[in-house]
Image (tube, rainbow, N blue to C red):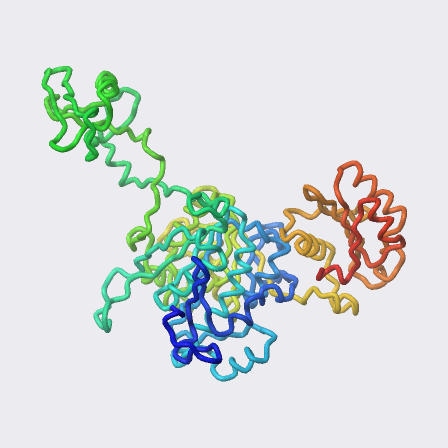
Amino acid sequence: MAADLPAYSNGYCPFSSLIVHCKAAMPTLDFKGKSLVYSHHLTVPSRTLEPDAKKSLPLKGSKPSLDDNLIIHGDNLHALKALMPRYAGRVNCIYIDPPYNTGNEGWIYNDNVNSPMMQEWLKDKNPVDGEDLERHDKWLCMMWPRLHLLRELLTEDGVLFISIDDNEQHRLRMMMDEIFGGESFVANIVWQKKYAPANDAKYFSDNHDFVLCYAKARGNGKDNEETTWKRRLLPRTEKQDKLYKYNDDDGRGPWRTGDLSVKTYSPEYDYPIVNPKTGKKYYPPEGRCWVTRKEQMQVWVQENRIFFGHDGKGAPQMKRYLREVQQGIVPLTIWLYDEVGHTDGARKTLKEIFSDKQLPFDNPKALGLLQRIFIVAANQDAIILDSFAGSGTTAHAVLALNKEDGGNRKFILVECEDYADKITAERVRRVIKGVPKAKDENLKNGLGGSFTYCTLGDEISPEKMLTGENLPDYETLARHLVYTATGQAPDKIRNTKDKDGFFYETSDRLFYLIYEPNLAFLRSADSALNSDRADRIAKQVKKKKKTAVVFATHKFMGQKELTEMGIVFCGLPYGVSS
């Protein structure tokens, strides 16, 4: 801890750039560059998402759409910011598999942090490798702003899963505690990624990875309250159901036997059970008692819920009916390879899909691993985001689940590398259309689905709007303005032909945008908030008892008069960044 380290006049300990500080009862993680990236997520410019029709795969008869499944090629920090006007507060589940920072990946820290100190620091060693003694600091600097934006994209009952290994697991968890709140921690899941030991291991064979799980919020922030996220149960397996092998043909269905005694002793529950056919009395095992009081046990005997053996002369057991058990399995925190798959199997699946390619992935994630996460995480209509998409396993898992249970899950992938089209999107194309040599029948015939491939467009900025260099379309600007004003993405923008520009409504505000994406209109009197428009808007304000927010290039009325009418005026283009 920091308190155990010697004090230095410059406040910096040369022995370690990573120091854990304690503020009251809340430990925080300090690392080199933290002060420079602390608010970087707020300064990342907003960009447009530009669909690429040639690389997209829309449904037959449809066009590429930003409302479809998305695969985005571009820096994931900028892509996350570009998603905000459409998806802030709307994503149900996020799964990410960031660089593990093992020292062998050679990943590049390229965030454009406007700090000479940061830029000078990064000159020395980039890409980041095992020889870089500050690689942990750089990894934390890279993850910090991304985790902030990911949290903002989640619904209030949303959940985030992160794959990681021992290199950064402990630092990641402390950083997550700081960003999400320690009370939002749900579980540290262990995934058995290998099925055999590595005989050349120096100390121990590394056979597992971690999957950290954090909910966005926990109740009212109290430690003893459940998270607002509610985990789902795993489906029961055929093997589990086969244990219920007996049936009395009395309409109650199959059953299995269960113990009637418990360890916690209570004299009230210590009594003889009488076999109604033989009259023989049975007492609980020594030191134990029956599971219920005598009166209830007698009811069970009369209802034929107590089993006295096949010959009717055995010790009593409980009949546990399949129809009465929980119709699902509570997930454990250890996920074995024979349940959710392993890395070797994931490589074989990828090779099956890309039999004609040499793939750049040594350790892809198992399809079953992600399917289990998504089953536990959210319902069948969930929006699922992966901002370190890699080979596209997340999209494959979503499509496979939808095929299996008829769900309508939606995926959003972000990949910054050059293989975003040739590998990430191509995998999704192939699993949608079908993989002829696949062993799985569904994959062979095609999982169905669609997606729109996007790149990152220009910044939405007042400067570029003033010059006409970048005038976003109406919907893009409208979504951006609502997000800027509320911090939430609008679910749907009104396809407006309203002459006053009404396009969105919240519980307390009406939003208007008087805009067309051309300079001639924006410089004309037609783009102004005039008295006629103001009068009509004021009538809606009075009728709905809400405030109106009007975005326009100029107005022909004073703000005092507009305020009396319940109207707040925001001037374009500067209202874009207000």
From the viewer's perspective, tell me whether residue 290 is left or right of residue 23: left
Classify the position of the C terminus by image quarter. Answer: bottom right
Indicate the quadrant where residue 210 lies: bottom left
Task: Point out residue 313 in the picture as x, y percentages from the top left corner.
Answer: 10, 22
Residue 359 in sight here = no
Indicate the quadrant where residue 39 lies: bottom right
Tally of numbered tags? 0
Depth order, front residue of 162/558:
558
Depth order, front residue of 478/10:
10
Q: Residue furthest bottom?
A: 124
From the viewer's perspective, tell me whether residue 544 is left or right of residue 138: right
From the viewer's perspective, tell me whether residue 68 is left or right of residue 315: right
Residue at left offset 53%, top offset 52%: 154
Residue at left offset 69%, top offset 48%: 493
Residue at left offset 59%, top offset 80%: 116
Classify the position of the N terminus by image quarter. Answer: bottom left
Depth order, front residue of 528/14:
14
Residue at left offset 58%, top offset 57%: 452
Q: Is residue 362 above or below residue 345?
A: below
Task: Point out residue 43 in the picture as x, y percentages from the top left corner.
Answer: 62, 66
Residue 554 in sight here = yes
Task: Point out residue 464 in the picture as x, y percentages from the top left corner.
Answer: 74, 68
From the viewer's perspective, tell me whether residue 362 is left or right of residue 95: left
Task: Point out residue 6 in the picture as x, y percentages from the top left corner.
Answer: 39, 76
